[in-house]
Amino acid sequence: MKTRMRMLLVAAVALLAAACGSTPAAEPFQLPPENRLPVGAKVLTPTPSQRADMSCNPLASLRPQGAQPQPGAMPAGSTMANIVASGKIRVGVNQNEFLFGYRNPATGDIEGFDIDIAREVARDLFGDPNRVELRPIETSNRVQALAKGDVDMVVQSFTPTCARRQDIQFSSVYFDTDQRVLVTKGSGIRSAADLGGKKVCGIPNSTTLDAVFALPQRPIVIGIENWLDCLTALQQGEVDAASTDLPLLYGLKIQDPNLEVVGGAMAADNYAIGIQKDKTDLVRFVNGVLERIRNDGTWQRLYNERLSVLGPSNGPPAPRYSD
């Protein structure tokens, strides 16, 4: 009996020593079952930076080719002629980004700065800015919608990157901005440096996640498919902050005066129009439209009508061309 007890004691001591000498793997953060986040919300893990690939100039596009054709008289066989023949241009847009692309509750129509830009392309194609078929798509599906041919172009606070240019093309940049942080007033969060360990919502596959994951003290990043759901999560205390481009944060702040934008710029950002990879003629045509609205005052008028809450503009960004 004594021998057996001695063996059991030795075994117990060995197990205890093994346990003390090992370091259990850290458990990844899991959303508690009682959370009130929207269906599909999930904790995101770091992925390779979408901006890390600098094999191209992501902001350079194709130069407009000569004089623009007159509305309704597109070159035979061109992408533009096919669009005109179809009766409308199919545009992927957002319906949850106040100021840029949102559904007006009073009218049910989708409105915003991005929508106005899309209508200017329709104006030059058809002579009618209303010849657009607005197709709401999730931010994370913008590249796929173009690659599959579901839309002719995407106008949706779309940032050009070299990685995305492997699958699609971009127009010249039509809007410049930077990235900040949105929190509830009195949260104690004053800048991105205070986000370590906090729950921050963002849109999966968006370039603004790069700056969040790059913070020295990493937050817990909660992926939510659209910004209205992110706003609700912030209001309900399910997340501590949101981080994306400044105008989109102002769009959320306007809807809830208990929110505030804090901190300095985390990253610069730019918006361009996404176009199918093989539609080079449409890229040049769209760049011709953007040249027109920069030069004839249309861009500034649209800014004043839609975005004056952001303060005075510095005017439209100058185009950069690769040829």
Image (spheres, rainbow, N blue to C red):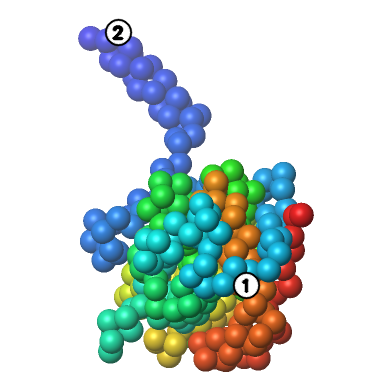
Residue at image coords 69%, 82%:
295
Residue 238: horizontal and vertical position, in percent? 35, 68
Q: Does residue 256 appear to the left or right of 245 in the view shown?
A: left
Where is residue 53 drawn, in percent x and y?
67, 46
Would you place residue 226 above or below residue 48 in this image? below
The circle on residue 101 is: none
Badge 1 amino acid: Leu
**Left/right of residue 217 with respect to residue 112 in the rendered view:** right
From this viewpoint, is residue 249 visible?
no
Around disc 2, counting alpha carbons within 10 Å, would you say few (fewer than 14), some (14 to 19), or many (20 or more)? few
Query: Who's the residue at 63% across and 66% down the image?
Result: 287
The disc labelled 2 sits on which kind of residue?
Thr
- Quarter of the image where one finds residue 210: bottom right
Residue matched to label 1: 290
Compared to residue 161, the image places residue 255 above or below, namely below
Q: Earlier in the sequence, mark 1 or mark 2?
A: 2
Disc 1 vs disc 2: which is toward the camera? 1
Would you call the spot at circle 1 few (<14 residues within 10 Å), some (14-19), or many (20 or more)? many
Name the image quarter holding the N terminus. top left
Check disc 2 and report the residue beneath it: 3
Q: Which is nearer the eye, 76 or 204?
A: 76
**Quarter of the rendering occupied by the C terminus:** bottom right
